[in-house]
Image (cartoon, rainbow, N blue to C red):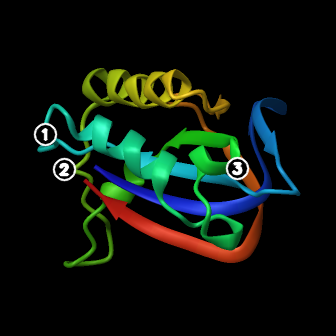
Amino acid sequence: MRAVLTRVSKAQVTVDGEVVGAISCPETGGILALVGVGVNDDSDAWKTMVRKISELRILRDEKSVSDVNAPVLLVSQFTLLGRTAKGRRPSWSDAAKADIAQPVIAKIASGLRANGIEVAEGIFGANMQVTSVNDGPVTVLVEC
């Protein structure tokens, strides 16, 4: 599993012209979490991802989402698993198929909510337009 976590002051996901998920957090910052599920992920990798999103100290003043009750915009992104070592066309063979990945993304969202975190989401498999205002900018790559 791979994620790109970006500290944002606001972010939103639009599908077919309609905003389906949004966060706004100019005081504390929040996290835009782009998450890709891999074919070889451990069955409990989602738990580690929940912990990383919740506890990484990448918000202002070295705080975490859990520390300041910051929101998260969670977006499934299989393209994070693309391999580009050969040729000009990425290989997506490391990305889990939708029937495997979608329940994992749902577990991450549920796990974050169980920790009391506000979670907005994109729509799995949709053509999404993601916009964000990066804060810092601070962006980290997380691999579980």
Element at badge 2?
loop
Residue 132 coordinates in the image, percent (x, y): 76, 58
Residue 104 coordinates in the image, percent (x, y): 33, 28
Q: Which residue is mark 1?
A: 42
Residue 94 coordinates in the image, percent (x, y): 19, 51
Q: Quadrant of residue 73?
A: top right
Q: Which residue is depicted at the point 71% across and 69% down?
A: 60
Q: Which residue is mark 2?
A: 93
Q: Earlier in the sequence, mark 2 or mark 3?
A: 2
Residue 106 coordinates in the image, percent (x, y): 43, 23
Q: Are dots 2 and 3 in contact, CB under 8 Å?
A: no
Q: Which residue is mark 3?
A: 130
User: How crowded is the residue under tag 2: few (<14 C-alpha within 10 Å), some, or many (20+)?
Assistant: few
Q: Which residue is depicted at the point 40% across and 51% down?
A: 52
Q: Are dots 2 and 1 in contact, CB under 8 Å?
A: no
99 above or below 97?
above
